[in-house]
Image: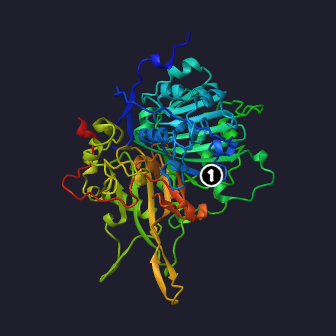
Amino acid sequence: MEEKPSKRPRRTSPARSVNDDGTETADFLTAATTTSTTSTTNSNNKTPTNQELFLDASQTPVIKLFASIEDLKLRQDLGSREITMSSSSHLNYIMTLREILGLDPIWKPFKGSHNPTTIAQGYPGRKSIEWFALSNFLCDFSFLMEEHPELLSVRNKVFFTQSGGGNNPDSWRFLDPSADFCPLNPKEEPSTYGTPTTNPLQYKFDYGSHHTKMFLVGMEDRLRVVVSTANIGKVDLELQANGAFVQDFPFKSSVKAAAAPSSLGDDFEKTLIHYFESYGYRTKKQWSNGGPARTLVDQLAQYDFSNAKAILIPSIPGYHAILPEGEQRPREGRATKPLQGYLKLKNAIQTHANVPSSHSSTRYGPVVSQFSSIGSLSEKWLKDFATSLSVVPPTITNSMGKQQPDLVDMIKLVWPTISEIEGSNQGISGGAAVPGRIKNLTKKCVKPLLCKWTTTKTTLTSTNNSMMIHKPRSIPHIKTFFQLQHQHRMITNADNGSSNNKEKSPSFAWFCMGSQNLSKAAWGEIINGKFGKCHRVVSWEMAVLICPSIMGKRLVPFTGRGEQEGGDMPIPLPYDSIPQRYCSPNDQPWNIDYMA
């Protein structure tokens, strides 16, 4: 008789150490057990439609934060009461992994939403999953299997994970021997003469990792693309701040009329296929029910990406050719591979972010970079990075004319203090998920840029529901990069006809989220070496960029003040969009050396 999950040995939680370059290395430490609330489901007194039950990201993509243990407890409390939840509630922007994968309905606070009968009967309208691919740095396969057992019955599965990083798939493989496991490590020797290896690249790199956090979910009528910031584990998803971008794409064969040419969709498809080609996974499978056997990349080519609402920002280890000075895109007839890392992000911002005219009243704030690991960075690299990501190259006008600003005016680095980690829901042990080195964080070019994870509005003891989208007590494992814009509008007084130039609330000029931390390994650097001038990247990563011009509406930080009713698209940011600089001698950057 098969053992019940509760009788399995206690799982261990993956902890991280960090190399000098900012890349993570995983090992396993016994984790303290925590009491958690299991994912809840919902039913209504009225029969809901299929569209109301499950996440549908076919027309508009969604950006969600993973539900923390506090969110799950709040759900449980609200589930016992009949209430109406407005779109200004932070719970609209919170989801579990089960909901994102389409295994559970979207939670709504209706009475009876915890009815176990509904769970036993299953959910009408749930899309059948025919295949899925997981790409991650760390995956707790026991957790994935126990909390998402439906995935065991999916016909085709492939797991791409960091090799030697504590990803022990034996528990899954024992119950599901047909699943493919593809460990990856750019530090290993490349394959030669068909010899299997964890490095399918042309070159070996001294450092770097497979750090992408992504799901491809092949449903009966669509492909769901999930770009995430989270490793797969209970602690990662419930005790740390993490987010995910989700969009669905139909089969090309199901589109009734030929879709209009879409440069955005074409770039999304080419980037996605080129990225998964880099894994060297060429196994043919019958991914779709009744379809022919294909490779994974050939299967991806069957979907219609013309409605893509984001730009994929990949990083693939390699020495990548760069465009000649002054060129933003390849010349006609010249075949080039997709841009990587920060050069792709730079190009996408310049192409899709609205650059104001010289007489525009739009002002831009510094680039905000928030991450969970930092490499050894120079002032030159930081200035190049900040300048590349700015919609308008920053300048300061003074008595000497226009001058380049100081680095402190160009970029803010959101990084937790020691006291913030100590006061988190995991305590000091949670700091292993934010593995920065003291020597990298106290550099002269870095320390003045540091900003706190919490603010005076969201203290570690805050219980204000309107600010609960912020996660001051969660370990900040999410990675976000953005630039705010401040615009003015003319307000006319109906009584006397006078006009007043009023500033709108800040909005995002662009917003990027994914797996990249702040390091050369993740974003790359321009070097001159044996391959000439090129862009060297040493880790696999993936992020998405969204802009107002693509979404057709303003992108604003979620505040709980009814942004959606006003036609804006709220972005659930788990910290303040205008972060506060370290200002006290007690504000010392958290560092992994503190745990030694």
Asked if residue 288 lies left or right of residue 366, the reply is: right
Q: Is residue 330 above or below residue 182?
A: below
Q: Out of 576 and 76, give the one closest to the viewer.
A: 76
Asked if residue 447 lies left or right of residue 199, the reply is: left
Q: Is residue 420 above or below residue 344?
A: above
Q: Out of 404 and 571, give the one closest to the viewer.
A: 571
Q: Is residue 243 above or below residue 290?
A: below
- Crowding near the residue tagged with mark 1, few <14, some 14–19, many ≥20 C-alpha atoms within 10 Å: many
Q: Tell me what residue is drawn at x 35 percent, y 72 percent.
A: 404
**Residue 241 in the image: x percent, y percent?**
42, 44
**Residue 128 in the image: x percent, y percent?**
69, 34
Q: Tell me what residue is drawn at x 53 percent, y 35 percent.
A: 40
Residue where numbered disc 1 is placed? 268
Q: Residue furthest left?
A: 585
Q: Is residue 590 above or below residue 333?
A: above
Q: Image quadrant for the C terminus? A: top left
Q: Which colour scheme appears in the figure?
A: rainbow
**Residue 201 in the image: x percent, y percent?**
52, 38
Which amino acid, by three-letter code, is at mark 1? Phe
Q: Out of 310 and 203, give the one closest to the viewer.
A: 310
Q: Tell me what residue is drawn at x 59 percent, y 41 percent.
A: 276
Q: Is residue 191 visible?
A: yes
**Residue 84 in the image: x percent, y percent?**
55, 50
Q: Residue furthest right?
A: 256
Q: Tell me what residue is drawn at x 59 percent, y 31 percent.
A: 158
Q: Image quadrant for the N terminus? A: top right
Q: Is residue 211 visible?
A: no
Secondary structure found at label 1: helix
